[in-house]
Image (spheres, grey):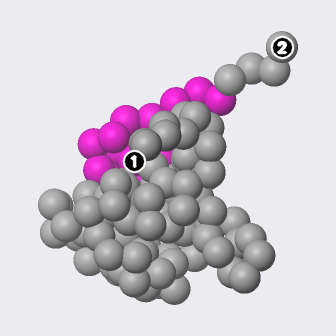
Amino acid sequence: MTTTKAADAYRTIGEVAAAVGEPTHVLRFWETKLPQLRPALRAKNRRRYRPEEARLVAAVGHLIRVRGVTIDGVRKIFSESGRPGVFAAAGMGPAPAAPADA
């Protein structure tokens, strides 16, 4: 039986890696080189990605694998324009607005 997670649910590193099309060790490597990629760590150092972090990993993966940007190039984009610049460079547009509290 396959279950579907809510859109705002945390994702495991395996789920994010599968969505991005990279092995988990590549995501861990990116975390060492890009301090902006910091998932929440749970018990036993298990990584949990918030939806926005998973989207950021996807943008970084797109820049590196599809656009041919180096890790240093991604660092430069982060330093010059932050997360919005990474999303824009990857062609992913602005981040979706957070839901308003009722």
Q: Quadrant of residue 22?
A: bottom left
What residue sits 59% from the left and 27% below the top?
Answer: 97
Predominant secondary structure, magenta span: loop
Mark 1 lies on residue: 87
Question: Where does label 2 land, which residue?
Answer: 102
- On screen, residue 100 above or below 35: above
| Relative horizontal placement of residue 27, taking residue 46 as reference (left or right) | left
Q: Between marks 1 and 2, how big is the CA–CA gap?
A: 28 Å
Q: Is residue 54 above or below residue 99?
A: below
Residue under the image location 51 percent in, 85 percent down: 32
Q: Is residue 32 above or below residue 60?
A: below
Of 76 and 1, which appears nearest the observer?
1
Q: Is residue 101 magenta?
A: no
Q: Amino acid at mark 2?
A: Ala
Extreme residue in the right direction: 102
- The x and y percentages for residue 71 are 34, 78
In the picture, measured across the screen, residue 80 lies left or right of residue 17, that is: right
Mark 1–mark 2 contact, CB under 8 Å?
no
Q: Amino acid at mark 1?
A: Phe
Where are the magenta residues, as a range? 84-98
